[in-house]
Image (spheres, grey):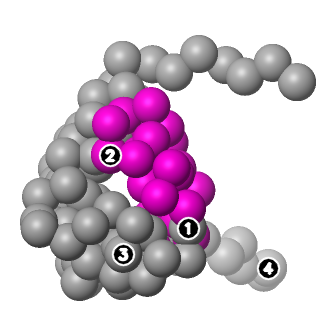
Amino acid sequence: MVRTPLTPEERLRGERLGALLRAARGERSMAAVAASAGISAETLRKIETGRAPTPAFFTVAALAGALGLSLDEILGNCAAEPAVALTETPAPVPAAAPAAVPLIA
């Protein structure tokens, strides 16, 4: 199976994710954080360096838990466009005018 090349935006998002994870890891070892997340240190290394810019959702979620990050923080720091908060109430949809009912005379 041939993988579609990543877009520049996907690569940039992967770089931002890697930088965020490195910063959140701080002085903790890569091996300790990876073990806590249930992934290999090599996988974490690839994500942090941008060589794996599109990790699986559950990998990102496990790393977020191990590093004390919320998925909202990750999205807010890594998305190309500002993320819309999930708690915002959508604008109301105007109700359709009732259809005219023909009168039978």
Q: Position of residue 21 (x, y in %)?
A: 24, 58
For the residue marked with disc 3, what is the amino acid? Ala
Instruction: Say which mark, if any, is on residue 48.
Output: 2
Q: First in sequence, mark 3 or 2: give its number.
A: 3
Boundaries of the magenta span: 40-61
Mark 4–mark 2 distance (CA, rounded to whole Å): 73 Å
Q: First in sequence, mark 3 or 4: give its number.
A: 3
In the picture of the structure, the residue carrying the numbered disc 1 is: 39
Mark 3–mark 4 distance (CA, rounded to whole Å): 79 Å
Q: Residues within 10 Å of mark 2 (few under 14, many from 20)?
A: many
Mark 3–mark 2 distance (CA, rounded to whole Å): 14 Å
Mark 1–mark 2 distance (CA, rounded to whole Å): 13 Å
In the picture of the structure, the residue carrying the numbered disc 4 is: 104
Element class at badge 3: helix
| Residue at the image position 36 percent from the left and 34 percent from the top | 50
Q: Was residue 59 drawn as part of the magenta stretch in this picture? A: yes
Q: First in sequence, mark 1 or 3: give its number.
A: 3
Q: Position of residue 83 (x, y in %)?
A: 23, 57
Mark 4–mark 1 distance (CA, rounded to whole Å): 72 Å
Q: Residue 39 occupies which quadrant of the picture?
A: bottom right
Q: Is residue 63 left or right of residue 81?
A: right
Element class at badge 2: helix
In the picture of the structure, the residue carrying the numbered disc 3 is: 32
Q: Is residue 82 above or below residue 100?
A: above
Q: Residues within 10 Å of mark 1 (few under 14, many from 20)?
A: some
Instruction: Say which mark, if any, is on residue 4.
Output: none
| Residue at the image position 33 percent from the left and 62 percent from the top | 30
| Residue at the image position 45 percent from the left and 31 percent from the top | 51
Q: Is residue 73 left or right of residue 2?
A: left
User: Furthest-right residue in view?
Assistant: 1
